[in-house]
Structures are given as C-alpha cells and as structure tokens.
Image: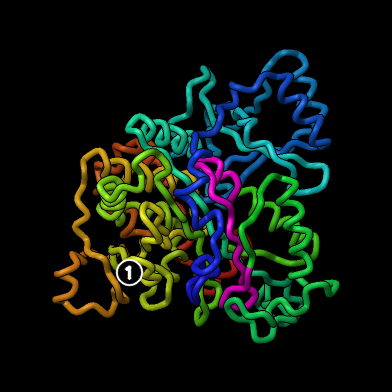
Amino acid sequence: MDDHGQPLLATAPSKLEQLHCASKAAASTSVPSTAWSNQAVLDRLKDLKAKWLRVYWQDYTGSVRMRLIPIKRVQAVLQSGKPFTISITKASLGLLQIDACIPQQSATGIYTACPDWSSLMLGPAEGHASCFAELREPNGTTAVLCPRALLRKILEKSKGHGLSFIVGFELEFIVMERNLDPNSGEKYCSLQNDDGHAWSMARSVADWGRSGSFTTTMDEIVEALEAAGIDIELFHPEAAPGQYEIVLPPLPPLEACDALLHTRQILEATAARHSFRVTLHPKPFAMACGSASHVHLSISSPGGDKPETYESFYAGILRHFRAIIAFTYSNPTSYERMVDSFWAGGRWVTWGTQNKETPLRKCEDSHWELKTMDGLANPYLALAAILSAGTSGVVAKEPLVWGDCEIDPAKLTEAQKEDLGVSQMFPANLTEALQALQEDKELSCLLNPLLVEHYVRVKTAELAFLDPMSAEERRQWILERY
C-alpha cells in the first residue's frame, strides 16, 4: 500500500487479505535445488523454450546481480550428468554499487552459485529464463554470508518451533522518462502525459491503449508476469507523480522474495523496452509520497491465529524493531521517507488495528502489515530479521506490552504514550540504525554474528561513499541504480 489513501484491499477480498485462510495449505519452504534431477531440469528448460538462463543473486547493497548463460551450455552440463553451477568471486558480497570492494574485503576466494531450480521462471525478456541461486563454499557447505540461504535457515528454525508463514509484498514504484532537455541537470523527468495523477484516480490510467503510454505497457508486463507464474492481485495509481502499485500474491516467504525480485526485473525490463525508467527510490520528490515495499505477513501454521501465538510473534518484532530497521531501511535515502503523519509508518515503535500511521498494522488475527520497508532493502535479509525476531517472541512467550494505537502516534500525548507503552523512536538515519543493530546482540545471534558484522561493514562503506554527495547528487545517483 502507498503512503496515502485507502487500499482496495480494505473493501475487496483478495488472496492477500486471506493470508491466513485457504492459502495456508501452500505454506512451505522452497524445494532445495538438490531435489531436482538433471533430467527434471532439462525437461523444464525444454518446456520454457528459452535461449538464455539468468542466474541471480542479491548483494548487501540491495543490488541484483546476475550471470547470463546460453541454454545450450546449461543443457550440455546437465546432460553430462554433472550439476550446473557457476563460480563467483567471494568479493561479490563485499562490493558497493560502483564495484569497489569494502576495505575488509579480500579479492581471494570463490563461491559456487547453485541455482534453486524451483525458482525457475520465464522472463524478463523474450527467450530468457531466470532463477535464483544460493552461494556455497567450494566444499559444498552453505556460505554463511548468503542472504537467500540465511532466510532458508531461519525458516527451518521457525518450522522447528512449529511456525510457518505466508507473505505478500506490495510493490510501489515510480515511472519516469529520460530527460531530453540538454540544458537540464536531471537525467530523468516525470511522465509527460500524467496530468492530475493521484491515488486510485481513474484519470491516471485514462490513456491506457494509447501507443507510448506506460499504462498500455502494463498489458505486456502482466502478460510476462503470468507467463512466469506470477498472478498479481491488483494494480492501481499511487499518490506521487508517475507512481503505481502492484500487489503480489501471498506465498511462502522464500518464494515471495523470489517473486518480488522477478516482478521488478520484468517491470524494469519491459518499461525500458518502451523507453521508460522505473525507480524504487524511496522519496524522489520531497513534497510527494514515497515508495515502499510493504510486507503482509501471516502465521499459517496451526494455531497461528490464536492471540497467544501471534501477539507474542509481533511482540518479538516490536522488541527488535529498532535493529530490524537497519535491514528494511538499508540506505541513507530510506530515511527521507521516515516521516510522521504521512501514512509511511512514522517514527514511533508501536502498532495499531487498521491504523495506517503505525509501522505495524493489524489487519485480522495473525495477518499484519509491516510498512517500514522499501525497495532498496535486500528482502531475504529483511525477512530473515523480521521472522527470526517474531519467532523468538513466540519461543519466549513475549507479552505484547504495547497497546493498540488508534490514532497517529505522532499526535499522542505523553500520558497516552505511557498508557500504550510507546516509548521508543526508530533510528533517525542509517548510522543510528546500524548502531542499534550492533547493540542488539540477541538479534545478531539469531541471524549470524559474522553475517551481521559483514552487513554493517558494507553499509558503513556505503555511507562513507554516499555521505559526501549533495542531496541532489545522491538523488540522481539512486535514481540511476534503483
């Protein structure tokens, strides 16, 4: 959902609003790649009729990286009886967006990228198929720093405590065009034919069908998503100029992250073929609403809708929320969106039933929405932090000491804050968030201290690179890369 306006989900039932109903049966972790025989993969590739295979992984800056391999090469390896893998330098998880290594990163060593064949999907271009890889050491053990493997590990731990989940993402994005004005310092500009754009406004899609319109391009985007097996819930205009939202279907967490990232690839690639630029910049326009990647979460295991289960789960998240923010608001630009009274989740650690000003919105039973995550975050790391914190709350039978906040938290009186247990604010910037993460030793242990230490190092180097930029220089830089 956006930072402004009432979503259609509030009035029209959808799979996402029924996270804890019929869709519970689908809850499971993704099938490991080792469960696929070479022949099964060959058959699947034949069905897809692709010429290229894209193997993706997402790094610690939230950047999606990949390798392109001709399908004939993939087939030849699989037909020889060997597993298909690719070698990637260990420096790949210690790189900044400009391909500079962080100071602590060595150029020595390799990872083996092992495709998870259960994530194999068509797209994002004609003749291409894509899948997501997990990184392993040369001896076959899982790489400690692999974000996707971390999420799988957290899901296995949660399953050991009798917990499973369903997740649905809301993908907000802004569509821009390349600026052809040679006298302008801006590389991108707002859509030219987008007068009066507003949240859920019918006129914002009035030119659907016109050649050269982005909304017309949505037909091609949805067709590509359907071919990839991703059936979106809905699409609608958002509040900022050229801003739209795609609501993705509820899925088990690992598959939900894969679907989110693949949807972004299809969206970006299709838009680019029509000369549009899609950006996930959290706040490209200072006076307009920002873009997020809201997380709808439900406990799908038996008993998940019992208050004694889900209240402890969300109490665990609230207790670790200040540290979790380092993963969900992972870029200094993210904190430009962290404002009160803007339907963006605000600055206070709290929750409320159907309250869009709180960072955690209770929808129904165990179905809650987390609003404080944007498109610059690595979703595997973010969900790993969220789910591990929630699971720890269930294990410890954490009491939900925060009361149900029914108004804008920023407008609470001191007496009301005390009554509701609202005492903490989120970190004001990424530096403070990283400090909160380092101080939260419990969350660090739940994830992996080595991984958390590496994440902090990458983000510290990223800050050192971005901080000297002016606000406008950083804005343009983010627009080019996200």
User: Which residue lies at the image location 76% right of the left edge and 54% below the top edge?
Assistant: 223
Element marked by disc 1: loop
Depicted 331 relative to depicted 100: above or below: below
Please state which of residues 319 and 330 is positioned toward the viewer in this rendering: 319
Q: Nearer the viewer, residue 456 or 423?
A: 423
Query: Which residue is painted at 19% across and 79% down in the image?
Result: 413
Q: Residue furthest right?
A: 211
- Location of residue 45 with respect to 100 vertically, above or below: above
Q: Which residue is mark 1?
A: 347
Whether residue 101 is visible, yes or no, is no
- At a point 35% along the width and 44% down the height, the residue shown is 304
Horizontal and vertical percent position of residue 94: 49, 41
Q: Is residue 340 above or below residue 52?
A: below
Q: Quadrant of residue 210?
A: bottom right
Tell how many labels.
Answer: 1
Please give the range of residues in magenta: 236-260
- The quarter holding residue 280 reads bottom right
Residue 44 visible in the displayed image: yes
| Relative to 241, 276 lies left or right | right
Which quarter shows the C terminus? bottom right
Amino acid carrying mark 1 in the image: Arg
In this view, the residue farthest toward the top is 81
- Coordinates of residue 252 in the picture (x, y in percent): 51, 42
Q: Is residue 149 left or right of residue 198?
A: left
Q: How is the image coloured?
A: rainbow
Residue under the point 80% across and 64% down:
274
Q: Which picture quadrant has residue 278?
A: bottom right
The verdict on residue 296 being magenta is no
Percent x, y of residue 129: 74, 39
The answer to which of 175 and 437 lies nearer the viewer is 175
Within 10 Å of disc 1 (Cα), the crowding (few <14, some 14-19, many 20+) is many
Q: Is residue 281 above or below residue 448?
A: below
